[in-house]
């Protein structure tokens, strides 16, 4: 704020403005910005006087940008500084600060380099280079005071000691703050400093980086730090301190050995310090997640190999080169780097990867950046990378932009074993560069073990695995436009394929060969809701345990072209470990399943088969499936009788609704686990008495053609729902419902029950109620004869007790 008119020296301008209507315009004409005057006008609230301002008339900076000598005059200085800057935000408004700064650090922007190569970066100014000095007590004990965060001064005369100058003579060590007693056994000195005092050499011990302090906002915290070794067998200690109230803290002394963990729990979230007491040079790994930490302390972890700060509040990417120069694994996923203060660090580009040491082998950066990735920046920087994890679980994602309209998957070195890029918007694979050892496309990696690229909807085209890759174990390529992966036949390492919701999957048999022939370790084929077409192969995967072919477009039949059976006899001949077999398609052949198709699957636990009314013939034999627990054969066109399931003692769930099964519903017996039995919408003509079904809870057999007598259900004590409507029953076995005390819903509507049968049913239900009094039971007898006599009276009593009984 320089005043150009020399007559106006000292801000004495009032007499020159008396005849001016617009004083703001006059001030601007005099090179006095109105904002400056507003600052002056309000300065009295901060303790300033008119005399303080007179000497400032020739300032070269606007007043609102300057705080220097008035630090001691204004009680609001610290508040202003807190608003303007801090360790989690940069200085703004081009504020110029001169004099002493009270605080741990100030974050600011600076220009690195010159000319076209110059970049704007973020840095911290530390106000304390050494966090603690050794005690001057003599002799020194475990509880001798330590001066934390002190500025150290050397004075002449007397003994070396802490304290004030008053009344003391001789050489001594003076600090600017009161020393604190040693609190934890792990507060060892990290540095030794020699100095000369009064002609004598004195050794001082200093602690740098003890404690390491992380600032977060949390209620609960699980944190873990591993150490390379212990110092004198002494474990590390922790302290959680509330920022707004330093008296509110929790100590965790002597935690663990080389692995030190804490589990902090509170009823409320607060801004808290996480303080760790140990020599930073002994730290091997740090894991502090979900603590709302926004920056890393300026402490060098010389020997650290792993940092995991996922799911925090980082916005500016840390300089890992300084913090952990030997790092091997870095996990900063689920942070907000796309909101960086530095514009050219809001994408995963060379500015970011160059902040990470080349020693890195594992990189986790999912949910951190938007936009594309220059395809080779990762491969060029980290030539020994084994894990790349860019997978997304919500939040920021990679997608096409002006720099890369196709958004190619980034290349990696051929050392890569784990590649995760799922649930983004990558749209192409790109190409391998050069000899194929450094900048390698994921399809060409020969050491790849796990590939997870599912959820990239527009990623389409042919998909194969490198012929030289004999290490591949798992592929996740769901929700893409990719074909079923090829190049896997004969690979014994291959165990898992998740290719569900894949609209261009294609056939399992190509040129007469099964895609995964002789993959003897393959245990999971999850192809749910994918456009898988064609015949069923002979699955030669001896370890196959999970096969999900629901909502596909398979036709079934033999690969040779024989369509006699929709599932040929030897389809699962080698799958003795098959546990789940799920097949559902509207294109399946209208031919039967071979009777012996499941004779080779003794471990079958879950059988799901839906053909939308197409598959005919009898239900195949299940006598070899001793472990069968779930049988779901809904909506086919099976005919013949229902098997008794006597060979399946573990059966729990049976669903054969919407078929054409006929004859009697078997006398199911001794099936102690049977809970659900759904046999509706068939052509059954009678119902046999069930025996020893202690857990049967749901029995639905409506919309059949059953005649004769409704049998007793006394052997089904836990029966809850009994649905038999729309049949042709005429009679009822006396006592049939009298002991079913858990019965809540009984529907016998639409039958031909006589009045005598209806009366007896009501009498038995009334006896049932008297034995175990309860309400909330629904009984539907519509469409049968009308009850009479005592039965009508019992109906009214039951209604008064909260039952619903309808019969007309």
Image (cartoon, rainbow, N blue to C red):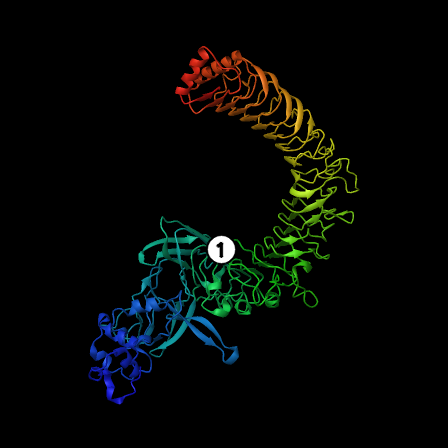
Residue sitting at the far bottom: 6
Q: Which residue is mark 1?
A: 258
Q: Residue at x 53, y 26 (%)?
A: 697
Total number of numbered labels?
1
Residue 3: where, in percent of width, then height? 29, 85
Q: Secondary structure at mark 1?
A: loop
Q: Residue at x 48, y 22 (%)?
A: 779
Image quarter hosting the N terminus: bottom left
Residue 573 position (above or below residue 364): above
Quadrant housing residue 651: top right
Q: Residue at x 24, y 70 (%)?
A: 46
Task: Give the class, few, some or many, for how many residues have Cα within 10 Å of label 1's Cα (few <14, many ≥20).
Answer: some
Quadrant housing residue 540: top right
Residue 312: where, in percent of width, then height? 45, 57
Q: Nearer the viewer, residue 431 or 314?
A: 431
Relative to residue 60, is residue 501 drawn left or right? right
Relative to residue 252, is residue 310 drawn left or right? right
Residue 630: where, in percent of width, then height? 61, 33
Residue 405 position (above or below residue 643): below
Residue 400: where, in percent of width, then height? 57, 62
Relative to residue 497, is residue 84 drawn left or right? left
Relative to residue 312, is residue 579 drawn left or right? right
Q: Nearer the viewer, residue 593 or 605?
A: 593
């Amino acid at each position: 704020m320089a005043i150009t008119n020399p007559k106006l020296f000292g801000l004495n301008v009032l007499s020159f403005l008396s005849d001016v209507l617009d004083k703001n315009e006059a001030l601007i004409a005099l090179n006095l910005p109105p904002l400056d005057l507003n600052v002056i006008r309000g300065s009295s609230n901060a303790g300033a006087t008119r005399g303080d301002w007179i000497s400032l008339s020739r300032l070269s900076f606007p007043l609102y940008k300057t705080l220097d000598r008035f630090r001691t005059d204004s009680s609001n200085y610290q508040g202003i500084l807190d608003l303007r800057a801090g360790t989690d935000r940069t200085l703004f408004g081009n504020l110029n600060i001169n004099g002493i700064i009270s605080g741990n650090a100030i974050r600011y922007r600076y220009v690195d380099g010159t000319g076209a190569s110059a970049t704007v970066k973020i840095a911290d100014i530390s106000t304390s280079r050494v966090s603690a000095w050794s005690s001057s007590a003599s002799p020194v004990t475990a509880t001798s005071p330590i001066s934390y965060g002190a500025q150290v001064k050397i004075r002449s005369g007397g003994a070396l000691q802490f304290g004030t100058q008053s009344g003391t003579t001789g050489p001594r060590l003076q600090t600017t703050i009161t020393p604190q007693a040693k609190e934890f056994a792990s507060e060892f000195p990290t540095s030794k400093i020699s100095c000369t005092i009064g002609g004598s050499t004195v050794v001082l011990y200093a602690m740098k980086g003890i404690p390491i302090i992380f600032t977060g906002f949390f209620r609960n915290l699980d944190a873990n730090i591993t150490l390379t070794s212990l110092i004198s067998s002494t474990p590390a200690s922790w302290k959680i301190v509330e920022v707004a109230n330093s008296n509110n803290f929790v100590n965790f002394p002597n935690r663990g050995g080389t692995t030190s963990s804490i589990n902090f729990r509170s009823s409320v979230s607060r801004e808290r310090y996480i303080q760790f007491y140990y020599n930073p040079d002994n730290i091997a790994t740090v894991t502090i997640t979900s603590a709302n930490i926004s920056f890393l302390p300026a402490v060098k972890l010389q020997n650290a190999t792993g940092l995991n700060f996922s799911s925090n509040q980082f916005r500016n990417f840390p300089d890992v080169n300084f913090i952990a120069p030997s790092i091997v694994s870095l996990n900063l996923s689920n942070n907000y780097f796309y909101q960086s203060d530095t514009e050219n660090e809001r994408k995963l580009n060379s500015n970011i990867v160059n902040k990470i040491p080349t020693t890195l082998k594992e990189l986790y950066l999912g949910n951190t950046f938007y936009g594309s990735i220059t395809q080779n920046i990762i491969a060029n920087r980290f030539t020994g990378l084994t894990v790349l994890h860019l997978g997304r679980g919500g939040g920021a994602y990679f997608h096409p932009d002006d720099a890369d309209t196709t958004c190619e998957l980034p290349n990696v070195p051929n050392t890569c074993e784990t590649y995760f890029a799922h649930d983004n918007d990558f749209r192409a694979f790109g190409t391998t560069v050069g000899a194929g050892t450094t900048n390698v496309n994921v399809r060409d990696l020969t050491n790849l073990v796990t590939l997870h690229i599912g959820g990239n909807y527009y990623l389409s085209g042919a998909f194969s695995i490198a012929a030289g890759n004999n290490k591949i174990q798992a592929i996740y390529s769901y929700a893409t436009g990719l074909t079923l992966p090829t190049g896997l036949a004969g690979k014994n390492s291959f165990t898992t394929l998740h290719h569900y919701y894949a609209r261009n999957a294609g056939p399992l048999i190509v040129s007469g060969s099964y895609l995964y022939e002789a993959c003897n370790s393959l245990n999971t084929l999850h192809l749910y809701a994918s456009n898988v077409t064609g015949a069923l192969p002979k699955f030669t995967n001896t370890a196959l345990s999970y096969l999900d072919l629901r909502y596909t477009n398979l036709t079934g039949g033999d690969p040779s072209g024989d369509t006699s059976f929709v599932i040929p006899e030897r389809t699962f001949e080698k799958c003795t470990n098959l546990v789940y077999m799920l097949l559902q398609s509207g294109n399946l052949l209208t031919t039967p399943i071979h009777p012996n198709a499941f004779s080779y699957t003794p471990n079958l636990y879950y059988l799901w088969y839906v053909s939308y009314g197409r598959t005919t013939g009898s239900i195949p034999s299940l006598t070899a499936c001793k472990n069968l627990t779930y049988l779901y054969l809904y909506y086919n066109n099976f005919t013949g009788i229902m098997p008794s399931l006597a060979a399946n003692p573990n059966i729990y769930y049976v669903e054969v609704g919407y078929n054409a099964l006929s004859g009697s519903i078997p006398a199911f017996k001794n099936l102690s686990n049977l809970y659900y039995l759904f046999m509706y919408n068939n052509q059954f003509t009678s119902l046999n008495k069930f025996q020893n079904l202690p857990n049967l809870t749901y029995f639905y057999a409506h919309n059949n053609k059953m005649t004769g007598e409704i049998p007793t259900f006394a052997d089904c004590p836990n029966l809850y729902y009994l649905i038999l409507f729309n049949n042709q029953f005429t009679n009822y076995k006396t006592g049939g419902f009298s002991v079913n005390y858990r019965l809540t819903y009984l529907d016998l509507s639409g039958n031909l029950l006589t009045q005598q049968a209806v009366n007896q049913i009501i009498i038995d239900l009334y006896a049932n109620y008297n034995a175990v009094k309860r309400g909330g039971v629904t009984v539907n007898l519509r469409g049968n004869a009308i009850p009479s006599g005592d039965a009508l009276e019992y109906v009214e009593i039951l209604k008064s007790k909260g039952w619903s009984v309808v019969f007309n």
